Amino acid sequence: MLLLSKKQDWLGNIRGDMLSGIVVALALIPEAIAFSIIAGVDPKVGLYASFCIAVTTAFVGGRPGMISAATAAMALLMVTLVKDHGLQYLFAATMLTGVLQIISGYLKLGNLMRFVSRSVMTGFVNALAILIFMAQLPELVNVSWHVYAMTAAGLGIIYLFPYLPLLGKVIPSPLVCILALTGVAVYLQLDIHTVGDMGQLPDTLPIFLWPDVPLDFETLNIIFPYSAGLAVVGMLESLMTATIIDDLTDTPSDKNRECKGQGIANIGAGLLGGMAGCAMIGQSIINIKSGGRGRLSTLVAGVFLLIMVVFLDEWLSKIPMAALVAVMIMVSIGTFSWASIRNLKQYPLSSNIVMVATVVVVVWTHNLAYGVFVGVLLASLFFANKIAHFMYVESHFDEAGNTRHYRVIGQVFFNSADKFTAAFDFKEAVDKVVIDLQRAHFWDISSVSALDKVVIKFRREGAEVDIIGLNEASSTIVDRFGVHDKPEEIEKIMGGH
């Protein structure tokens, strides 16, 4: 059952979870608003989504202590849909995203995370950081010097405030940045963009609303490509975040349950007038480092967020956009893996190519799923090429019996099959050939076909062929798909001649 959670998850760390949840809620508000603006929707869409997703995943998510809400990665995929078709189609796409994620959970696609290499994960995170930064540039173009001054001051507060004794460790610096810059902007009556200029903030609790779109194939045709992309990116970021939090807390998590939980949360977000979201790497780390460990921290974050938004909406509308830009630049800088730049000289060329390719594809297409797909594909090809190099064939000649002994060592599969075939001398005049496969493994039909080719060629040259030492797994695939010991199959191949 999704709702079956241990008592320890809820009541094992009440004080730490309550305090960390409040800190996360304060930090979530500017991000939820900023991500809404990235997507081209009213701030309330991101705020309602963050509330719904955080509260829902607190109950049905697979990773206690992880924060899920509206995110930049998801917002970036919504821009075209909102621009071309409007808000109602975004709500429908959000619900379909949830359905696809639930299906993925039941198909146990969470286990596919094992195929995402460290290089791909690093590229994913770096590309996300670059996209977040690029999304801030419109707010810094054709503006007055006040905006640049406020943004610079905001970054100064964010990075210097934590060094203050006592207060610096207690109050999150992004919150101080927002409060300080809002106070300055209101006091000096600066004519700069504020959150209120971006759209109306909510002043009521969210209500259930079915998306106002036609229920037909045309609608499905419009929203499915976006929902598929959102589902993939949401699962990737959520599962990667879960993996990071697993390492930080030294506790396991259920990745397939996380897929289902994220799906249920997104369906709820769509029904409450919110956008699709997923787990947040930055906020989850803030939660863990603030003492949050259980599901209570995620629940408190969502509930406290809504309370503040509904009852303090007048103040939130006065927040200058420059303050949010500063916060988002901080998120971008904090998300980027700077160690990956330093390690370029130390890491293998193949790992660097995978990481850089992932970044380039994501930034070029603005789609994290494409980048991860290319990264996984390249990593797989490099791995296959590397493993193929470890396959080699030794041989020695026994004059007494006019016999050539071949010993195959390593993995025989599609990439090493040609190398395997080329290692045998078919023109050598011998009575018998012994192929020792004790230290070899045959993985696919390409390798079985290569073995067939070798045996048939030797027999055609008049040599007797013995295959010895085949392990059980290899023997199973060779017996099933091999033809060298099946005269009727060889007859078919030779065309009956």
Image (cartoon, rainbow, N blue to C red):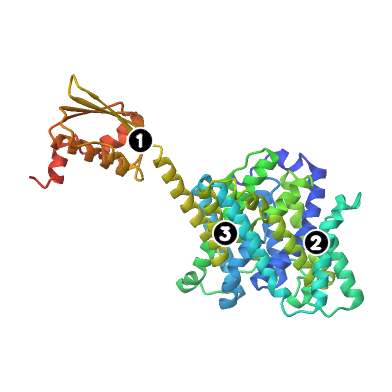
Q: Is residue 88 left or right of residue 193?
A: left
Mark 2 or mark 1, whichever is nearer to me: 1
- Amino acid type at circle 1 is Tyr
Q: Is residue 471 left or right of residue 195?
A: left
The one of 368 and 205 positioned closer to us in this rendering: 368
Give how far apart the Cα atoms at labels 3 and 1 are: 36 Å
Of the two numbered discs 2 and 3 on the same chain, state the one appearing first in sequence.
2
Query: Which part of the image, by quadrant, shows the N terminus?
Result: top right
Q: Which residue is mark 1?
A: 392
Q: Which residue is mark 3?
A: 359
Give how far apart the Cα atoms at labels 2 and 1 are: 67 Å
Give how far apart the Cα atoms at labels 2 and 3 are: 38 Å
Q: Which residue is mark 2?
A: 307
- Amino acid type at circle 3 is Val
Of the two numbered discs 3 and 1 on the same chain, state the one appearing first in sequence.
3
Q: Is residue 36 left or right of residue 189?
A: left
